[in-house]
């Protein structure tokens, strides 16, 4: 969750108070209707009880450009695309949308610290047809999990603002079911 520095709110709590005092006036940019950052913003609106005006763009770059220019006040942009502008002071990081703080910006709180139960993360997984033999699924799972704990891969994922979550095929199935329900 990144804001234009001209917005008077410097914390999530201040942002929520500001948005409640200005219902429908705070503009939230996204990369488009139904995209991951739009959904992250809608979850925030629902849990925080605020009314933000959604401004959809045709991609992340135009949304970020208008955030920098002040046409929108907040976005729920991917960390990697925003971190340079955050570090330079051109944007203000209010929070990360993952369940915990990000390694890339350790001083930035997670939204869940303010809104219990909030988590909106982009994730990637590997799926196979149901008819795939169990031994093939287990072998793929072992090899992928080994790669995800490799120090070189872990370091690179951290540089990209990502975190790996090795687990079993059953773990991933439960995760998919939980995400679908959310």
Image (tube, rainbow, N blue to C red):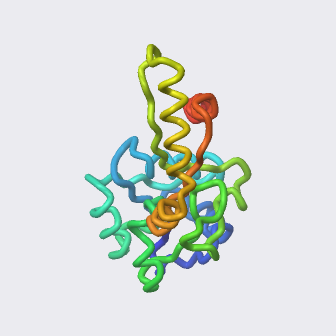
Quadrant that contains the C terminus: top right
* In this view, 134 is above or below 66: above
The location of residue 41, given as percent across then percent down, is 51, 52
> Which is nearer the eye, 153 or 180?
153
* Picture residue at 27% right of the left edge, 63% below the top: 62
Whether residue 76 is situated above or below residue 86 in the rendered picture: above
Vertical position of residue 45 compared to residue 61: above or below: above
Q: Residue at x 38, y 55 (%)?
A: 30
The residue at the far bottom in this view is 88
Left or right: 96, with 62 as reference point: right
Towards the viewer: 168 or 62 = 168
Q: Residue at x 40, y 41 (%)?
A: 34
Q: Is residue 79 visible?
A: no
Q: Is residue 157 left or right of residue 101?
A: left
Q: Position of residue 80 (x, y in %)?
A: 42, 66
Q: Residue reaching furthest top?
A: 131
């Amino acid at each position: 969750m990144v804001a234009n520095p001209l917005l008077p709110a410097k914390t999530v709590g201040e942002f929520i108070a500001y948005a409640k005092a200005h219902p429908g006036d705070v503009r939230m940019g996204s990369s488009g209707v139904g995209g991951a950052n739009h959904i992250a913003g809608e979850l925030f609106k629902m849990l925080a009880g605020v009314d933000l005006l959604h401004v959809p763009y045709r991609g992340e770059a135009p949304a970020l450009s208008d955030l920098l220019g002040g046409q929108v006040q907040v976005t729920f942009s991917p960390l990697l695309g925003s971190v340079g502008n955050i570090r330079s002071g051109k944007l203000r990081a209010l929070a990360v949308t993952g369940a915990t703080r990000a390694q890339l910006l350790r001083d930035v709180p997670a939204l869940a610290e303010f809104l219990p139960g909030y988590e909106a993360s982009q994730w990637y997984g590997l799926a196979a047809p149901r008819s795939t033999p169990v031994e093939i699924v287990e072998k793929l799972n072992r090899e992928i999990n080994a790669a995800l704990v490799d120090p070189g891969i872990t370091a690179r994922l951290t540089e990209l603002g990502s975190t790996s979550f090795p687990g079993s095929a059953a773990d991933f199935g439960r995760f998919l079911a939980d995400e679908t329900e959310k």
